[in-house]
Image: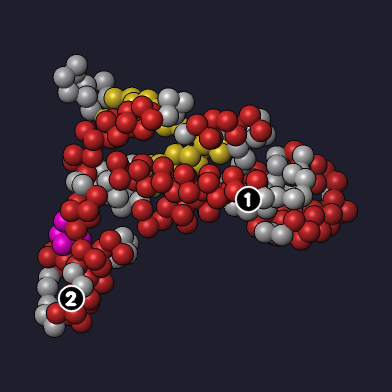
Amino acid sequence: MSISHLVTNNLEISALNIIQEVQVLFQMGCTYKQAWYARKFSIERVFGSWETTFNILPKYLQAVQDNNSRIVYEFLHHRTSSPRNNVFKFVFWCFSPYIDGFAYCRPLISVDGTHLRGPYKGVLLIAIHRFCLHHIRANFNKTFKNTNLKTLMWQAGTESKQWKFDRVMKDIQERNIDAYIYLMKHGIMTTNISEALNSVLKKDRVLPLKALVELIFNKLVKYFHQHREEAKNCVHPFPT
């Protein structure tokens, strides 16, 4: 097994872990600097360099849009850019299934982010249609200064079973009707979307930008296909 295989199989592997693996696999030592550069070069060999990814990304998104005209993307460059030399600042993209599905979401947009870990620090911002549970809890605590309600609110928001969620919400309703109305108004979640998002992308935040966008695209294609098949085979009515 090579160092490239170690890195691509575990994108979060640290330089210290590489030193340990080299000692085990090859019975030889290496310095921290050597391990760090080995990790960097391995990622670039498979996914491209961070420097070139900014030039490749516009071509990639245009190619995706050429095959699906309803995909939307837009770049924003720094003011220091010139007609012949754009300096990257932001890029926005949205895939058509999300555009279609947004019509069926609650009329509420919340933006949450996860920090990227490459040499060019950045933030991947995600627009979701419900609040992050941490933000709901912070605002809830300001309005209802009650330890028991705080605990029940978090319990309801992290439940994965509908019947458990309903049971906790009924308890909140019986204790404080205003707190219950507040939570229902803000669309309390049965899962924490922001934590789920960070968990899914945790290992991928070290990737160059183009590779990260491509990986998200492939994951979403798989996600859309899976849920489309589940919907087609569903024999129960959807909740309204």
The amino acid type of the residue labelled 1 equals Glu
Q: Where residue 120 sits: x, y (%)?
A: 25, 43
Tell which of 147 and 56 is nearer to you.
56
Residue linked to disc 2: 22
Element type at mark 1? helix
- Residue 81 at x, y percent in the picture: 21, 21
199 versus 16 height, above or below: above
Instruction: Say which residue label 1 marks.
Output: 230
Tell which of 200 and 234 is nearer to you: 234
Q: Residue at x 30, y 34 (%)?
A: 60
Q: 236 left or right of 76?
A: right
- Compared with 86, 4 (above or below) is below
Looking at the picture, the colour scheme in use is: secondary structure
Classify mark 2: helix, strand or loop: helix
In this view of the protein, can residue 121 be seen by the observer? no
Magenta-colored span: 37-41
Tell me where residue 76 sits by quadrant: top left
60 in magenta: no
Q: How far apart in space, not on screen, are marks 1 and 2 (Cα)?
A: 45 Å
Q: Is residue 23 above or below residue 201?
A: below
What residue appears at the point 23 percent right and 39 percent down from the top-left corner?
53
> Which residue sits furthest right?
174
Q: Main secondary structure of the magenta part?
A: helix
Where on the picture, by quarter, is residue 50?
top left
Q: Residue 152: where, in percent of width, then height?
A: 74, 58
| Residue located 53% across and 44% down the image | 224
Give residue 16's position: percent from left, percent from top. Answer: 23, 71
Callout 1 touching callout 2 (CB < 8 Å): no
The amino acid marked with disc number 2 is: Val
Task: Give the class, few, some or many, for how many residues have Cα within 10 Å of label 2's Cα (few <14, many ≥20).
Answer: some
Crowdedness near tag 1: few (<14), some (14–19) or many (≥20) residues, C-alpha within 10 Å: few
- Residue 10 shows up from this direction: yes
